[in-house]
Image (tube, rainbow, N blue to C red):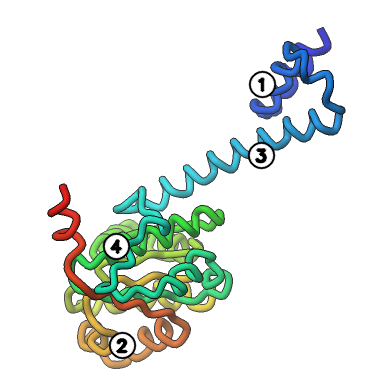
Amino acid sequence: MLTEETITKLNELRLYQMAEVFRKFQVDANSSALSFEERLGIMVDQEWSVRKSKKLSRLCKSAGYVFPHACIEDIRYDSTRRLDKTMIAKLSACTFIQKADNVIILGATGTGKSYLSCAIGIAANRNFYTVKYIRLPDLFSDLAVARAEGTYKQVIREFQSVRLLILDEWLLFPLTATEARDVMEIVEARYDRGSTVFCSQFQVEGWYEKIGEATFADAICDRIVHNAYTIVLEGESMRKILGVKK
């Protein structure tokens, strides 16, 4: 009777895994050899493990990755790519997020910028940081809707609060005056508060022309570049390489 009451109370407290392990202990003759502390430890470990796993799944799902299964361990270090394995390992440890540093990933179409950015993001999720992946054109669309609905500042705060923001297709096209102001709002809101990954086909020197207005361009680039790690992806298109193998 007491056992069932205890299980019911654990379930009411939403300690479902502890309740399940406790129930198994009651029918497992070998569990009697364990001390109270050992049994309690096993119950807590199971509850903690499942909760952490569910939290990780939620973080990855809410990030909205274009490559939801990207993994640091699966990155290809072909000599033609000139990828620094030490730097990738350092980024995967996520100390750059603690310092609110940025990451700039440069490379031609198909060199793996999006995959690498998602792999870094998922590494951050594994450290239980919040991440948001979004293409810059989609960001502008979201902000345009927010502006029309009167929720612009709220949406800016949402992008400000995420610990790691991944902006793909960064400055793929020249910005309008409104888009330049939007970028300035995002960059300023996140400056020294959160890390951002910028994926671009163009060298930083070419960003100024893409942004347009000189004052905005200087302010935006200065806030991004001065505390950023830069990765330049070279070599043949990964889409072509992987496509040949299929």
Looking at the picture, which amino acid does disc 1 mark?
Answer: Glu
Q: Which mark is residue 203?
A: none
Q: Which mark is residue 48?
A: 3
Q: Are marks 1 and 2 in contact (CB under 8 Å)?
A: no
Closer to viewer: mark 3 or mark 2? 3
**Where, by quadrant of the figure, is residue 113 drawn?**
bottom left
Looking at the picture, which amino acid does disc 2 mark?
Answer: Ala
Q: Earlier in the sequence, mark 4 or mark 1?
A: 1
Q: Residues within 10 Å of mark 2 (few under 14, many from 20)?
A: some
Q: Are marks 1 and 3 in contact (CB under 8 Å)?
A: no
Q: Earlier in the sequence, mark 1 or mark 2?
A: 1
Mark 4, residue position:
114
| Residue 200 in view here | no
Q: CA distance from mark 2 to mark 4?
A: 24 Å
Q: Are marks 3 and 2 in contact (CB under 8 Å)?
A: no
Looking at the picture, which amino acid does disc 3 mark?
Answer: Trp
Mark 2, residue position:
217
Asked if residue 36 lies left or right of residue 105, the reply is right
Q: Residues within 10 Å of mark 4 (few under 14, many from 20)?
A: many
| Secondary structure under the numbered disc 2 in the rendered image | helix
Q: Quadrant of the N terminus?
A: top right
Q: Earlier in the sequence, mark 1 or mark 3?
A: 1
Viewer-closest of 174 and 107: 107
Q: CA distance from mark 4 to mark 1?
A: 41 Å
Percent coordinates x, y for residue 214 in the rendering: 28, 92
